[in-house]
């Protein structure tokens, strides 16, 4: 988290500022000294809101309230970001129906939580050289058991250890 330095009162360097009061009233473009005297008259601080504007925008308000509002904005922005993990389900060709149902149930829960699910069909020994259509059919067996609606992000592809597919919630 990067903390942006905000200039207040005498640390503001711009000679002219567009000043806004804490009520939202626009005082227009005035000199720095005039803005500082306006702030002192109201027992508040002069805070540079957007230093890159021409002329820079400053607001007359309590610095503590400004910090509180900024933290509140950051908290709301952070809560809106969605994190999704890549969960993994591993099956083999001979995995029984009951085990497949349990793994599909777990995958459905993960999808409901917004996570992506990677389904790995591990191939051992001679099974690595089986017909690709047969292997995809085995992969579809578990995918049909998943109750949550999903879309296939990465279709079943053959890798070193077997077949892998990635799915996520629609």
Image: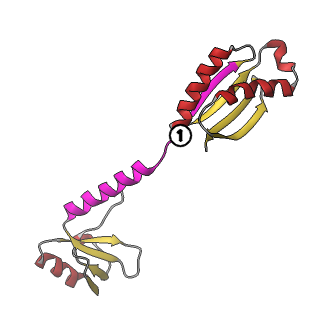
Q: Is residue 84 left or right of residue 20?
A: right
Identify which residue is drawn at 11% across, 72% down.
Answer: 43
Residue 133 vs 41, above or below: the answer is above
On whether residue 86 falls in the magenta region, the answer is: yes
Identify which residue is drawn at 57% across, 31% down.
Answer: 108
Specify whether residue 147 is in view. yes
On whether residue 25 falls in the magenta region, the answer is: no
Identify which residue is drawn at 40% across, 50% down.
Answer: 78
**Chief secondary structure of the magenta span?**
helix
Residue 140 vs 33, above or below: the answer is above
Q: Position of residue 4 (x, y in %)?
A: 36, 59
**On the image, which quarter does residue 61 sit in?**
bottom left
**On the image, which quarter does residue 124 sit in?**
top right
**On the image, which quarter does residue 18 sit in?**
bottom left
Image quarter (top left, top right, bottom left or bottom right) of the C terminus:
top right
Residue carrying label 1:
114
Q: Is residue 11 left or right of residue 169?
A: left
Q: Out of 16 and 28, give the one closest to the viewer.
A: 28
Please count the marks in the image.
1
Q: Out of 60 and 31, give the one closest to the viewer.
A: 60
Q: Please, what secondary structure does the residue beneath circle 1 have?
A: loop
Q: Position of residue 3 (x, y in %)?
A: 36, 55
* 10 Å crowding of disc 1: few (<14), some (14-19), many (20+): some
Residue 12 vs 31, above or below: the answer is above
Q: Is residue 6 left or right of residue 158?
A: left
Q: Out of 98 and 130, give the one closest to the viewer.
A: 98
Identify which residue is drawn at 86% across, 20% down.
Answer: 130
Residue 77 vs 147, above or below: the answer is below
> Which stretch appears magenta?
63-91
């Amino acid at each position: 988290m990067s903390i942006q330095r905000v200039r207040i009162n005498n640390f503001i360097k711009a000679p002219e500022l567009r000043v806004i009061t804490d009520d939202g009233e626009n005082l227009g473009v005035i000199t720095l000294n005039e803005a500082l005297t306006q702030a002192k008259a109201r027992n508040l601080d002069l805070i540079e809101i957007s230093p890159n504007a021409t002329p820079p925008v400053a607001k007359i308000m309590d610095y503590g309230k400004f910090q509180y509002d900024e933290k509140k904005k950051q908290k709301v922005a952070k809560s809106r970001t969605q994190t999704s993990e890549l969960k993994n389900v591993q099956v083999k060709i001979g995995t029984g129906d009951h085990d497949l149902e349990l793994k599909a149930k777990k995958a459905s829960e993960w999808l409901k939580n917004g996570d992506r699910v990677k389904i790995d069909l591990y191939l051992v020994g001679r099974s690595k050289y089986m017909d690709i259509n047969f292997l995809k059919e085995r992969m579809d067996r578990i995918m049909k058991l998943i109750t949550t609606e999903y879309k296939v992000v990465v279709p079943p592809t053959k890798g070193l250890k077997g077949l892998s597919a990635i799915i996520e919630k629609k």
